Image (cartoon, rainbow, N blue to C red):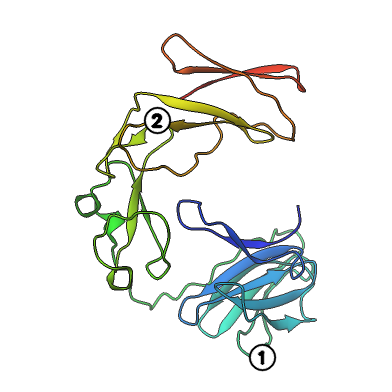
Amino acid sequence: TRGRIERTWLDGTHREVIVDHNHTVWPNGIALDFEARHLYYVDAYLGVISRVDYSGANPKQIVSGHLQHPFGFDLLGDNLYWSDWQTLSISQINKQTGEDLRVLKTISVDEALMGIRAVDLSAKNTYKGNVCGDKSKSGCSHLCFMLPSREKSGRSSNSSNKLDEVDDLYYCSCPPEYALDSDGKTCIVPDSMLLYSLDGTGIRRMSLPKSRPKQPPRGPLMHQPGNNRRPSGTTGAKGYGLTNNDVELAAAETAAMA
């Protein structure tokens, strides 16, 4: 698999690459600058630290030449921090200029240097609760996903306000064994469903409600590695058992449709 950095919405939809394989090979660590809306990443193969904005635009190389095999990576204030497998050290450098390099700690060869986290112990808790953190506000019976408030989407949300006036834009969803009812908030056991197969991805399902909102595609009920699989499915007496026969692997799998 080629190296890349991606982003998605919290529910896994709207997946997009923001740093592709032309700009990174081994992106071992990323760090977010929330105030500047920058993403920093360290590449162990190229030996560089680079920066892009949240959409992947405006790339800038911050550090080159000081890194042997960086692994752990973080940001705090004006500095970037990383651990290095080759030098067995933890270092810091200015995130804007790529200067003021300091080696903070060197460990012995017998110790395993892995991930790091930089923590400001004096910082106050600035977390503000959102509607998904309070079931009485969201009304979601099972799952609640926040949506980017400034990005328009085709998905219907549970807010009646205009997008540019909404603080908490969200929608309700359900685990695989349920379907969303017509109120857009309550998960129920569906009365019927449709099973379909896709080459290389396995067997998927979608509920067949009479008047319920559209649901995003669910993950496969049975994962089938490789391409050109030809699954065949049969349901049990009560409609909850599924058998998959793989003609290439000469194997049979069973799974619950719930």
Q: Is residue 63 above or below residue 230?
A: below
Q: Is residue 5 visible?
A: yes
Quarter of the image with the C terminus is top left
Residue at the spot x=48%, y=58% of the render?
9
Amino acid type at mark 2: Leu
Residue at the spot x=67%, y=31% of the render?
224
Of residues 20 and 127, the one nearer the viewer is 20
Residue at the spot x=29%, y=37% of the render?
181
Crowd rating for badge 2 (residues with CA inside 10 Å; few <14, some 14–19, many 20+): some
Of residues 92 and 38, the one nearer the viewer is 38
Q: Quadrant of residue 54?
A: bottom right
- Label 1, on which residue? 100
- Label 2, on which residue? 208
Question: Residue 165 location in percent, x, y?
Answer: 28, 72
Cα separation, mark 2 vs mark 1, equals 61 Å
Q: In terms of secondary structure, where does tag 2 sit?
A: loop
Badge 2 vs badge 1, beta-carbon distance below 8 Å:
no
Question: Residue 38 location in percent, x, y?
Answer: 55, 77
